[in-house]
C-alpha cells in the first residue's frame, strides 16, 4: 500500500500526530509525509491512501490547508481512499469546531473515497503572555493516533472501489 500523509501545523502538534500516523502506516508499505506547503497537487498512479490533517482554528481548517485544496489538480484524488484528522481543544465539537470536518468535505469534493470519519486528537492549551500561546497534546493522543492509523490501514473499505456513479 502506498500512502501519503499531509499536514498543517503551527505549534508542532499536528506534525507530531502526522509523523506517528506515518510510522503506523509503514508496515503496510511506502509512506510519504508532506507539510501542506510542500504537498503535491497531483498524486502518482498507485497511491492507495491519503490522510490529511491540520489544526482547528476559529472552528475550521487553517488558510494554508484551504489553499492546498484550492490548488489541487482536477481529479487529483479521484477514487483514492482517504481520511481526515485534526488537532483541537478537548471541548464539545459544536463549541470548538473541527478542521477535520472541513478537510473531509474537501477530500470528498476532490473525488476521494473517504473510508473513515474525521478523527480529532486533543490538545491542552493555555494563553501565554505577550500574545503568545502554548499548546501540547493531551497524554495518550500520539498512541491513539497510531491506533487510528492502523485501523484506517486495515479497513476493509480501503481496497473496495467506489460504486459506479459515485
Image: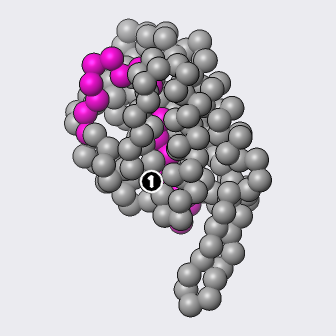
| Vertical comparison of 84 with 14: above or below | above
Image location of residue 97, percent across then percent down: 60, 56
Q: Is residue 107 visible?
A: no
Look at the image and tell me in which quarter the N terminus lies.
top left
Image quarter of residue 47: top left
| Magenta segment includes 36 | no
Q: Residue at x 58, y 41 (%)?
A: 20
Look at the image and tell me in which quarter the C terminus lies.
top left
Q: Is residue 122 visible?
A: yes
Image location of residue 79, percent across then percent down: 37, 20
Residues packed near mark 1 inside 10 Å, few (<14), some (14 to 19) or many (20 plus): many
| Magenta segment includes 47 | yes
- Is residue 106 shown left or right of residue 154? left
Q: Residue at x 34, y 28 (%)?
A: 77
Residue, far left: 73
Residue bearing the label numbered 1? 8
Image location of residue 136, percent across then percent down: 66, 63
Image location of residue 10, percent across then percent down: 49, 64
Secondary structure beneath dot 1 equals: loop
| Vertical comparison of 115 with 56: above or below | above
Q: Residue at x 68, y 57 (%)?
A: 137
Q: Residue at x 58, y 57 (%)?
A: 13
- Is residue 149 shown left or right of residue 158? right
Which residues fall within the magenta stretch? Answer: 41-60
Amino acid at each position: 500500500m502506498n500512502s501519503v500523509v499531509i499536514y498543517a501545523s503551527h505549534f508542532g502538534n499536528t506534525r507530531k500526530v502526522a509523523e506517528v500516523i506515518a510510522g503506523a502506516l509503514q508496515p503496510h508499505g511506502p509512506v510519504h509525509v508532506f507539510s501542506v506547503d510542500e504537498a503535491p497537487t497531483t498524486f502518482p498512479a498507485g497511491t492507495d491512501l491519503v490522510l490529511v490533517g491540520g489544526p482547528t482554528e476559529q472552528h475550521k481548517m487553517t488558510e494554508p490547508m484551504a489553499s492546498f485544496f484550492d490548488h489541487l489538480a482536477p481529479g487529483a484524488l479521484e477514487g483514492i481512499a482517504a481520511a481526515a484528522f485534526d488537532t483541537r481543544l478537548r471541548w464539545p465539537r459544536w463549541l470548538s469546531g473541527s478542521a477535520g470536518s472541513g478537510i473531509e468535505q474537501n477530500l470528498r469534493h476532490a473525488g476521494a473515497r473517504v473510508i473513515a470519519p474525521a478523527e480529532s486528537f486533543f490538545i491542552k492549551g493555555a494563553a501565554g503572555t505577550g500574545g503568545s500561546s502554548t499548546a501540547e497534546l493531551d497524554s495518550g493522543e500520539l498512541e491513539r493516533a497510531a491506533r487510528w492509523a492502523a485501523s484506517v490501514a486495515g479497513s476493509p473499505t480501503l481496497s473496495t472501489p467506489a460504486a459506479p456513479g459515485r
